[in-house]
Amino acid sequence: MISPYNDEYFMKQALQEAQKAFEKDEVPVGAVVVANNQIIARAHNFTEHLHDVTAHAEMQAITAASEYLGGKYLSGCTLYVTLEPCVMCAGALYWSQIDKIVFGARDEKRGAGRFQNQLYHPKTLVTNGILEKSCSELMQEFFSIKRK
């Protein structure tokens, strides 16, 4: 039997978090951290409400997952995030020693990929393009509304 828990399934969960951010007038980025096919943390951007430039979805998810696990390292975990992590988030993910990062849409302006993944831990597997269209469309819709 094929497991229903795959990259697409977990990215849909991250998209649900991004939708929550959208509804709160936050940049719609959502993230989930998974260990053993179980979501251990859910988060979305919260920078506007917290008045905190570091309150990106990834940072919130790292903190929640670390709290759940009772330690600072996320080895054995995968982060699913709707937008490519920025340099700040990539640095935090490096220090967390997370096993895998899966993101939906690329961030050509601010994404850590501009540095050819040099910012990610050497043992971290990075995958992208999962539900890329859905992730991009939500972001485009948000900024289209903002420009009006």
Image: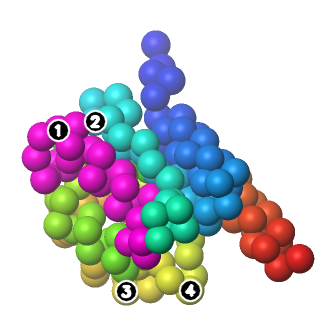
Residue designated by label 3: 115
Crowding at dot 4, Cα within 10 Å, few <14 / some 14-19 / many 20+, comes out as few
Residue designated by label 1: 69
Relative to 83, is 43 above or below? Answer: above
Q: What's the distance in space between the residues labelled 3 and 4, CA to CA?
A: 12 Å
Residue 40 spot, x, y in % from top left: 32, 35
Mark before the other along the chain sequence, 3 or 4: 4
Which residue is nearer to you in this view: 17 or 127?
Answer: 17
Q: What's the distance in space between the residues labelled 2 and 1, CA to CA?
A: 10 Å
Residue located 46% across and 28% down the image: 5
The amino acid type found where label 4 is placed reads: Lys
- Contact, mark 4 vs mark 1 (Cβ under 8 Å): no
Q: Which residues are magenta?
A: 52-75
SS type, badge 2: strand
Residue located 57% across and 82% down the image: 108
SS type, badge 4: loop
The amino acid type found where label 2 is placed reads: Ala
Residue designated by label 4: 109
- Contact, mark 2 vs mark 4 (Cβ under 8 Å): no
Mark before the other along the chain sequence, 3 or 1: 1
